[in-house]
Image (cartoon, coloured by chain):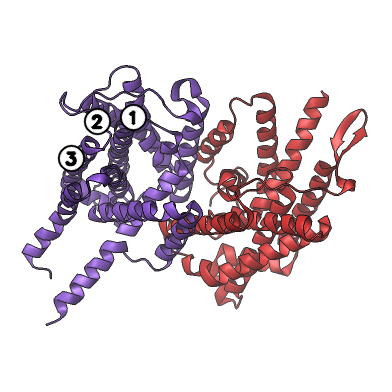
Amino acid sequence: MIRAPFRALGHALPWLAAAAGYVLLPEQWPLLASIAIAALFAVSLDLIVGYAGVVTLGHAAFFGTGAYTAGLLAQAGWGEPLSGLLAAAAAAALLGLITAPLVLRTGALAGLMVTLGLGLMLYEAANKAAPITGGADGLQGVEIWPLLGLFRFDLYGQTAYLYSLAVLFLLFLLARLVVASPFGLSLRGIRGNGRRAPALGVPVRARLTAAYALSAAYAGVAGALLAQTNAFVSLEALSFQRSADGLLMLVLGGLGSLYGALLGAAALTLAHHALSEASPIFWQLWLGLALIALALFGRGGLTGLLRRLADAAARRP
Amino acid sequence: MAAAITVLLDGVASGMLLFVLSVGLSVTLGLMNVVNLAHGAFGMVGGYVCVVLLNRAGVPFLPSLAAATLAAAALGWLLERLLYVRIYGRDHLEQVLFSIGLVFVLGAVADFFMGARQQLIQLPDWLSGRVELAGIGLGRYRIFLILVCGAVAVGLHFGLVRTRFGARLRAAVDNGPVARGMGLPVGRIFSLTFALGSGLAGLGGALGVEVLGLDPNFPLKWLVYFLVVVAVGGANSVMGPFAAAILLGVLDVAGKYWVPEVGAFVIYTAMVVLLLARPDGLLARART
């Protein structure tokens, strides 16, 4: 067992690191903001993959929906950031509610293919709807108003980082509450044994649909953050690569703990930053090798590794 | 009228090509329940082997095709023995991660050695140009594709239905534990089948350089098409995926010819709708 003070420190550690990053690395604020956004996306995936056990290959659909919702709102002349986030969350959740029956209807394998197909459909639709989305050129002319009417989004990324971090923190707390609630426990029950859960009186389909929509809303908020802090939306927000990156972050950090999502997002974004400067091919190679190694040998990702280390340290007299 | 026949022929030819590329996947994904998103990578490897032999070493076209098939089969066999056996029976998330990782690694390797650009090949004279039949020009290479891929389909069908290996494969897939109990070497049957499927993908990739293109993005670009063939065609026969591939090829070519502004959207929509309507495949036998 790990003693209580250490446990509390463990919970605070990611946020202490984020605060330290703000103070110590002012020239890296944009990078830190992108970590916070990636972390929110990974948390969103953790809710549906890690807790509910529904594997998806098309989660970027919700990220992109949120990004385009916030971007189009701002382009149309409503650049208020917080209401933009809410609109993005609502749009993504709506898409989640519509698509959840399609994904959950068939078996696990066909459902996986459906998520992939839906994600690609949306990408192709955004690509072809160039008059609205800007197509391959991206959405131009996004103007975001100052946050709360006070803080302008500056070139150094100060507002962007603090804003993204605050949203991540609040939504992370909310997610902790959700997964500890009876709702969250029933999700874990469904993942553990999908046939026994209905026998215990758990409405499986309704719970999974709710989890899917919640996870979609989270991804939509992450996408909206990206759109608002960059004042730009590209097709990349909807790409298969983004879905795959999210899954990798999650599995690298460790499924089903929410902290793993934070850790994996930070590790992967930093690695991407460091390696892709050398060469994009190297990045792709290392990413691929990491995925293979994780799939074959990864047990619980980085958080699993930390937990095993902590257990070993605790056992030593 | 002439345009319609040309589109039909092109569609059938590219459908046949899709069949050869994806029939191996219908075994791994459909029968063995392994989410192998890296199947297209074997096609890509076959394509590059063909391009290198043809353009740099000056080997004639047909031996290059054979070499591409063998190289992809050998790679498939090696990877199956070393890596894929470890992910049989694991959960889908691990299989997805593993196979995406494999796509990224092979794509990066191809990018490193061959560059990111589209590869081009020079077809031999006897395959280029057109023949006139009743006033309609038909591409010689399209006819060649239909003949080769059709022969592969017929061979596979009779191989699966008539030969001892086919019978063993069907037994191993229908009920692995019982087949093993009856003394069938299930592991070896699967790895031979995997190698065969990879080799056919390599052949398809090599044949497809001229039709589908070839670059390091090939496995992901065509992944959805392979998945559609498997999902729509079902996995119980050779003819199901064959019919699905032809249908897909004709739809795809017709869509690109007559409504280019809609593009690939048609195919993705068709995939989702068909998956929802018939999750076990169009020609799947009724579940008992």
- Residue A248 disc label: none
Q: Is residue A249 visible?
A: yes
Colour purple maps to chain: A
How crowded pointer 3 is (Cα within 10 Å; few <14, some 14-19, many 20+) is rated as few
Q: Foreground: A296 or B125?
A: B125
Residue type indicated by callout 2: Phe
Residue A231's label in the rendered image is: 1
Residue A166 image label: 3
Left or right: A174 with respect to B114? left
Q: Classify B87 as above or below A149.
A: below
User: Which quadrant of the structure image shows residue B283?
Assistant: top right
**For the residue labelled by badge 1, is the local secondary structure a helix, a strand or a loop?**
loop
**Marks 1 and 2 in Cβ contact (< 8 Å):** yes
Question: x%, y% of residue A81?
Answer: 24, 27
Q: Quadrant of the N terminus of chain A?
A: bottom left
Label 3 sits on a secondary structure element that is helix
Instruction: Between label 3 and label 1, give the one nearer the viewer.
Output: 1
Spatial separation of the CA atoms under disc 2 and disc 3: 15 Å
Mark 2 falls on what kind of element?
loop
Look at the picture and state if B131 lies above or below A71: below
The residue carrying mark 2 is A153
Q: Residue type at mark 1: give it.
A: Ala
Nearer to me, B270 or B219: B219
Q: Is residue A237 above or below residue A258?
A: above
Of the residues under marks 1 and 2, which one precedes in the sequence? 2
Q: Position of residue A43 (x, y in %)?
A: 27, 47
Q: Residue furthest left?
A: A5
